[in-house]
Amino acid sequence: MLMPLLPLLLVGLGAFGPEVDFAAPEHRNDWLHHPVYGDPSFDSFKRLPGNPIYRGAPPYEWPVNGFLFEDPKSGDWFVYIGLYAKNYAMTDDLIMRCLVCRSRDHGTTWEQLACPFPDEPFRFDDNTSPVGHAPDVSVLYADGRYHMIYDWCTLDTRWETAANPPAPSDSGVGYAWSERPEGPFIRTSPAVYRTGKSPLRMGKYRRGYAASIVKRDHDWMVLFMMDSGANYGWALFGTTAEKPEGPYSDPVPLRTVEGDYFHPPLMEFFPAFQHGGYVYAPATSVAQNRDFQCLFRAPTEEAHRAEAWELQQCGSVWHAEPVPNEYYGIWGQTFTGFVDKTGSFNVMFPSRDPQGMGTINLARRPWDQPYREQGFVLGGHGGTSLTLLKRNCSAFELAATLKYTGEVALLWGYNAPLGPDKPAADAALHRLSLTRHHALLLTADTWRITKTGDTLSPEVIASGKLATPAERLSLTLSSEGKGVLNINTACVWQGSLEVVSGALGLTAAQHSCLQVNNFYLPGETSPSIIPYLYTEAVLGAGSASETWDKKEDGAFRYGVGAVSLKPGARAKWNVDGTKFELWAPTGPGYGKGTVIIDGAKQPSINFHADTPTPSHVVWTSAEMANGPHAIALVAEDAAIPLDSLSATSQGN
């Protein structure tokens, strides 16, 4: 007789031995967190009442950036909202601007004030075009003044030309000051940074925007973003000056995808904040699903040095709630805020509603308690989110408690390769990443057990109706292939299932949300072996443009790969693991490549062979410390193939 689910949860023992609850926060690193695939977030943020505090409307449909500031003199809260037209349209009549709002009751009610800048035209030195667009700002109070840093574009700039503005148009970063937090702010010249007068940096970065100002003991520092256009890399740069108005030093890169360290791709920084002697720079993924966040930090007085920066938190930083004003998850920038005297971390965050209008919202968590006491949230917004448990098993006895909206799934026997569908913004899961697994799919009123092979056409093994959404489920698969499924304590199915060793995982479909409160898995598991596609490495190095030629060829491990177009072409997998295997075909047309592990150069790999040979293991790493690593591959003097990397991971 099947054991009901509730007693199984209470007893804590099954036929497979003592169980582990992988929804407990101490097991957060047993799950895969990724800026494209998804983020099972254990964060402890809770929403403040009254959200959204501001919603977009024509002609400014996208208020999707902002800055939350607590005035140390009055205790009032200010939010500086960047107003954008839909699709970031810029014309003489659609001018991106900043709106100041004030709350005298710590975020409960808000009043709209005005634009922080005077109405009269302003020009930087040597600029014939006036500054027109200035939506994004950050503010701090020091030395009796309110200091603002802001990004700007001249009135004749268009979104399509902002990265490389043709003269006389220009863009960049500027400084302003005021005696009041609401302004008016007096802009100064020259600019902190000007895109039009700046050379390419690191061969690809030029446009400066999304800036934050930092007061240090003996100088001032501005942190700002640069992007690389068609290469789809984003970098955090820093510049310093003795006075807040400048002149500022030549900007230096602080965190980039070009570094030989672990650095999740597609991360856009803005804005930074200070607390406890550190500068913190939160960053958000600009993939299709945008809830994945990172938190970088450096000691304030050392923040001008790239070596001082560390990735403090990679995933489990943020989750979206299944409410209309958070329909697209975080969208635009990441969260922004401050730690108050009570130790609460108060933040503003932007999103978009089902009608596509931007929303500005508030949330809070204890600063010293970044993780919730129990459970995690996996959200799908622009597309499907996926996470994998970094443990492999074949037979298993699993029990879980959960809540969900939309369509979610439990995966097992997962052996698909992971990768983005494109090395670019708005990247989603590669089609191959949704193959080679079994799944239990759940909606509000149905369940289905499916098997997906090498194509995206799943075979339905069993299905049924649900009177209410599943809140408790258990799934047992014996080593003999007997499967038993309980939903809400009732046995809904028993039958035969194929026994396949692979990873367990979860998915949340587009605009779906899965909250997992418990995820019990008794018994022995083995380290997972996760293969990553070439697209992961192209994205991870920010080298999408004119560097790698995409190929569909059966010689590659999964039928897809790339070939380098010039010497020095670089790819990088940013992955967790203890051991790595590089797969690739070899043949007459290939030369040598170099592997670099966390900055350590390895002996060259010779991809040349007299006879073409399909993909096989061409390099294996030594055993390494469990955790995040950067595995780079660089072409030497001839073309090399870029195929896949297998990572062995043990989780926590």
Image (cartoon, grey):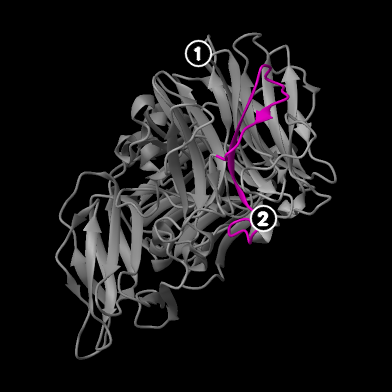
Q: Mark 1 points at which residue?
A: 343
Number of marks drawn: 2
The answer to whether residue 21 is visible is: no
The amino acid pointed to by label 1 is Gly
Q: Which residue is drawn at 38% across and 48% down?
A: 263
Q: Nearer the viewer, residue 191 or 521?
A: 191
Q: Main secondary structure of the magenta part?
A: loop
Instruction: Residue 516 in the image: state x and y as whole percent.
Output: 52, 37
Give the vertical position of 359 relative to 127 (above or below).
Answer: above
Query: On the rendered structure, is 47 left or right of 547?
Result: right
Secondary element at image label 1: loop
SS label for mark 2: loop
The span from disc 1 to disc 2 (Cα, nearest Å) is 45 Å
Residues under numbered marks 1 and 2 in contact, where contact means CB atoms less than 8 Å apart:
no
Camera-side residue of 82 and 213:
213
Amino acid beneath label 2: Ser
The stretch of residues the image draws in magenta is: 162-191
In the image, is residue 488 part of the stretch drawn in magenta? no
Q: Name the residue under label 2.
A: 169
**N-term-proximal mark, 1 vs 2:** 2
Q: Residue 46 at x, y = what percent?
A: 60, 25
Query: Residue 359, located in which quarter of the rendered image?
Result: top right
Note whether 194 is above or below 609 in the view shown.
Answer: above
Q: Where is residue 519 in the image (x, y as percent from the top left)?
A: 45, 37
